[in-house]
Image: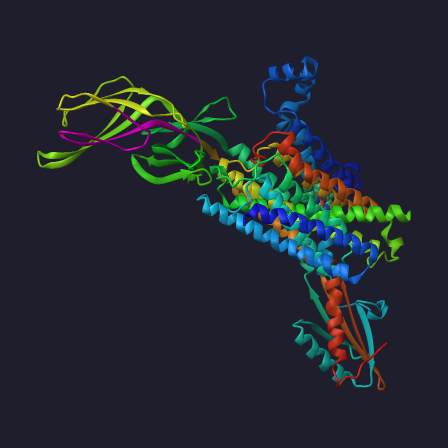
Amino acid sequence: MESSQLLGITTFIYLAATFFYVAFAFFKVKGLGILATSATLLGLWVNTTGIGLRWMETYQQGIGHIPLSNMYESLIFFALSIAAVYLVIEHLYKTKIFGSFVLPFAFIAMAYASYSAEFGKDVKPLLPALQSNWLVAHVITCFIGYAAFAISCGLAIYYLAKIMSSNNQNSPKNEEAAIGTVSLAKIDDIIYKMMIFGFIWLTAGIITGAIWANSAWGTYWSWDPKETWSLITWFAYALALHARYTRGWNGTRMSIVALVGFISVIFTYYGVNFLLSGLHSYGG
Amino acid sequence: MTLKDNDLWKTFSSVRLALLIISLLAITSIIGTILPQGEPFSFYIEKFGARNAIIFDILAFDDMYYSYWFRALLIVLCLNLIVCTYTRLPGTLKIIKKDNSNVDTRKFQLGKDCFKFDTTCDKTTAVGSVTKALEKLHLKAKQKDSGKEHLFFYERGAWTRLGAYFVHLSILIIVLGAIIGNIYGFKASVMVPEGSSVDFVFSRDDDNKRIPLQFDIFCKDFNIDYYKDGTPKEYKSDLTIVEDGKEVVKKNITVNAPLTYKGITFYQSSYQQIPNEFSVQISKQNDKDYGGRSSQSRNFSTKTKIANSWDEAQATFKIVATSKDGHGHGPYEILFDDEDKKPATFTTNDNDPTVIKRESGTYTFLINQRFATGLQVVKDPGLWIVYIGFGVMLFGLFVCFFTSHRNIWISITGDDMTTTVFVGGKSNKNLHGLSKTVEEIASILQSDKSLELRRV
Ligand code: HEM
């Protein structure tokens, strides 16, 4: 079996998991929840195996390198990170209610990777500049960060949907009334925690990227559009941290920030490649 | 009026200004990602019209990240950080140094983080049990006995309240490193032909000004490796640093693996074919014995259409023509003759040893396009400061988000009839972790048979 087949299957598993989570949210049947989590675990496993297989394929073609070097491969890793971080949250907070807002991100990432015609999916040899362990660290750290931001965005959508459907005031403290099993205050808290978690990884991602750039070109920062957009995203989340800490932003406001922040992430990751020009090779 | 009442000072110490500046930095940064940077004025006229081009020029949008207004924003951010730190740090230090053992535990609200128990055992038994429980959880607590009350006090991570200060400091460190690099460093480039050396480089920022080096940099060889599909796999230059006539360093540099000497780093960044210059190595395996030697070889540096002769072997050759293969050189058409006087042409590829059998012996012919390697030359004395800043930033973020300042009090009070045990804690962050620890202590005490606690 080829890695692309496995990864294609992963797409459908994440889709199935999404359905199970939605069904669980509606019917609140325990079995559906278990099914949803199992599907996610299976998806994660097939996803990982797919990446492993692709890694082996690069070696079979005599150009062995970890498959994190183009848009296709990074999307696959993105999906993996989302599923993995999500499962940790589900375990920590003991609720499956967020799944229907998070798994769609993993599904979309995989579907886009598998079915888009915009970028090549072949195993390609690595250009000299990309042959660096710092690059590997850079991609991994960035995408864990992006996954955390994706989850905070998913939860923000959930939060906003709840607020709109119940027309409550926007302070989470007024809404201790539990929704499902999770109070709005708790969702707000998790959104914030995910932003923090993402912020640390994004910071590490920007730093490893800078070190890589320095080892390849002798400049750790050159204001190339991709670098600059990652900094803009970083500023956006730094802003959110300070607004929360010092001005007490939370609830609806914070959810909107999480949404806007993730739009900035998407632009950094995707928009820059396809709308602007720059150094980064992704999208080739 | 003291400094702290000054309006300007107040502004600079406020987080409100920080929010404003960070927003401005984020929003204005977008301009430079949309508008091409560093192009000549004519480019902007052509693309956006004269009026817009003039506006861009005035606002320095064509080089915005190095413009005065963008630098001013960065400076304000730094001042904001410095003033803010200056005004807040003393307060934070006070909190850190504060002796938290002097609290009135009766004022605590019972709940998740605070438990109260009664027991009929005497105080000494209770103290013993608590000591054991704390030992079991490896919590090293201080003890105080005022006669009326026996207090256990555990404190951890007061210093972690400095987390945000580390992050802020790291920003200042990085900016400092960048400034030092800008003032005392340079970015330059140079092309070094194979087999030659240079002792200067051309500044990239400063109108290609020549920057002299204190040593020579010699390029022995430049090579490109290709993958099977023809894409480049590796660019490699064999460099030697020669100082005072001595070879001091020798290294093969590749992209991502530069060479540093005396604070100056040489990066593999580009290459050039030197038009119409080739190096040729011919060797001959003698069938007959030639003066005791069975093989001989010689190197030539040549151009097309020039006759070269190798007198010892009585051989001559001439590159008649070259065409371009995928990589821009070869195959070559070579006219060859030797003592047999039977001129012949053959073709050979770049860097591809070709064997020619002749009556007088066997020749091996190796031709190479001559290259110049393109080096990026950087001196950045601020780099290690920037890297330290990176480290401090990651450390600071870790402290901010994964550590907390935690206090736990266990107070034992009692008269002859009952003894009261209070377990309670406070934490500035990670309240969940604190609750867990407090609950753990409480449950160990509760399961202690000798105590027979009753929850109040
Ligand atoms: C891009 C620049 C900045 C970054 C990345 C940054 C980062 C941070 C981080 C990570 C925290 C910890 C938040 C938390 O514990 O929840 C923090 C807190 C804080 N920041 Fe910043 N900061 C920046 C700029 C500034 C500036 C310019 C000011 C100036 C007023 C400022 C004032 C504060 C204050 C007052 C806190 C709360 C400190 C405390 O925990 O006592 N920050 N910052």
Main SS of residues in magenta: strand
Q: Quadrant of the N terminus of chain B?
A: top right
Percent x, y of residue B109? 85, 67
Q: Picture quarter containing residue A227?
A: top right
Percent x, y of residue A240? 75, 44
Relative to B196, does residue A136 appear above or below in the rendering?
A: below
Q: Is residue B366 magenta?
A: yes
Relative to B338, does residue A128 appear above or below in the rendering?
A: below
Q: Which residues are magenta?
A: B346-375
Q: How is the image coloured?
A: rainbow
Number of labels in the image equals 0
Q: Residue at x 70, y 77 (%)?
A: B133
Q: Is residue B348 magenta?
A: yes
Residue B267 shows up from this direction: no
Q: Is residue B344 left or right of residue B31?
A: left
Given residues A255 and A6, the one toward you in this image is A6
Q: Quadrant of the C terminus of chain B?
A: bottom right
Q: Picture quarter containing residue B387?
A: top right
Q: Is residue A213 left or right of residue B95?
A: left
Residue A261 shows up from this direction: yes
Q: Residue at x 78, y 52 (%)?
A: A22
Q: Is residue B89 left or right of residue B335?
A: right
